[in-house]
């Protein structure tokens, strides 16, 4: 599988105390572990993104545990209250232990 | 040396072991049902209704990617906020979908994702409040083409 590529949409500017919407997507096949290989008839081992979290200036904003019923290329949308300028750090954790991250800055003013 | 009698004796003993062994094996592989997952999440507490709004399409043509949106009425302060929301798909081989965890930094208890649904079924959202109470909502989604692969 190609290396998962995270994409996030975060407003560049916000007012102090404003609640913003954040949209995230990561390219990942989310292999459920339920499908069988059509040629061999054997189960294809599960490999999914099992956890996603967003932190703002080191403080946890939102976290989710994912199970195999989440679609491939998992899309996650959530809200965040912006108290001050800073950086949102997004982290996806793969079943194989890989961690994918990206970050976005938000300016208050 | 093994004669025919012994073979039958050992054979039946083996069969008995197999018979006893199978149910235990089956038990170990039992997939928790929707009710099991809800009980595990709530600890058996009573679940109210009305605060959770769950938004799903009435009809999903493609069960591979069904948009699900959940929001919960809450002031989202340190004292009074929504801690977690468990999403379950009642008719999937495994009902678990996702658990959203909110903080006071979330501003509002809102999350949206896309899920797989194997067939027409109910999607369930159970919210755990910071005061230890629970709220839930349930929606039926009609699925035209199931989304769990061949």
Image (cartoon, coloured by chain):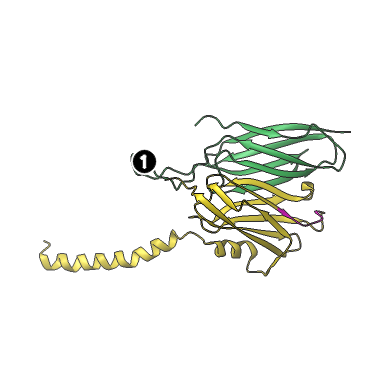
Image quarter (top left, top right, bottom left or bottom right) of the C terminus of chain A = top right
Pick out the residue farthest to the right: A109
- The colour applied to the residues of chain B in this rendering is yellow
Image quadrant assignment for residue B78: bottom right
Magenta-highlighted residues: B71-76
- The colour applied to the residues of chain A in this rendering is green
Is residue B114 highlighted in magenta? Answer: no
Q: Position of residue B90 (x, y in %)?
A: 54, 59
- State the residue position of label 1: A38
Question: Depth check: A23 or B121 in front?
Answer: B121
* Vertical placement of residue A13 versus B29, above or below: above
Q: Position of residue B121 (x, y in %)?
A: 54, 58
Q: Is residue A71 left or right of residue B1?
A: right
Q: Is residue A18 left or right of residue B102?
A: right
Q: Secondary structure at mark 1?
A: loop
Q: Position of residue B112 (x, y in %)?
A: 67, 47
């Amino acid at each position: 599988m190609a290396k998962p590529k995270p994409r996030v949409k975060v407003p560049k500017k916000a007012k102090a105390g404003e609640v913003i919407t954040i949209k995230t997507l990561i390219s990942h096949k989310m292999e459920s572990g339920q499908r069988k290989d059509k040629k061999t008839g054997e189960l294809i081992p599960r490999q999914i993104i099992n956890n996603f979290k967003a932190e703002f200036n080191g403080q946890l904003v939102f976290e989710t545990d994912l199970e195999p019923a989440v679609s491939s290329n998992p899309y996650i949308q959530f809200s965040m209250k912006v108290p001050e300028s800073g950086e949102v750090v997004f982290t996806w954790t793969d079943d194989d232990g890989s961690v994918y991250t990206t970050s976005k800055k938000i300016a208050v003013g | 040396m093994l004669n025919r009698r012994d073979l039958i004796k050992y054979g039946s003993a083996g069969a008995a072991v197999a018979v006893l062994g199978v149910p235990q094996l089956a038990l170990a592989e039992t997939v928790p049902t929707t009710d099991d997952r809800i009980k595990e999440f709530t600890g058996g507490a009573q679940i109210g209704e009305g605060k959770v709004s769950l938004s799903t399409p009435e009809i999903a043509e493609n069960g591979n990617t069904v948009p699900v949106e959940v929001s919960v009425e809450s002031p989202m302060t340190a004292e009074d906020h929504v801690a977690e929301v468990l999403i379950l798909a009642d008719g999937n081989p495994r009902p678990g979908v996702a658990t959203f965890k909110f903080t006071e930094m979330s501003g509002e208890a809102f999350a949206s994702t896309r899920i797989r649904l194997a067939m027409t079924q109910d999607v369930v959202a159970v919210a755990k409040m910071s005061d230890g109470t629970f709220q839930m909502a349930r929606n039926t989604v009609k699925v035209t083409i199931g989304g769990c692969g061949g």
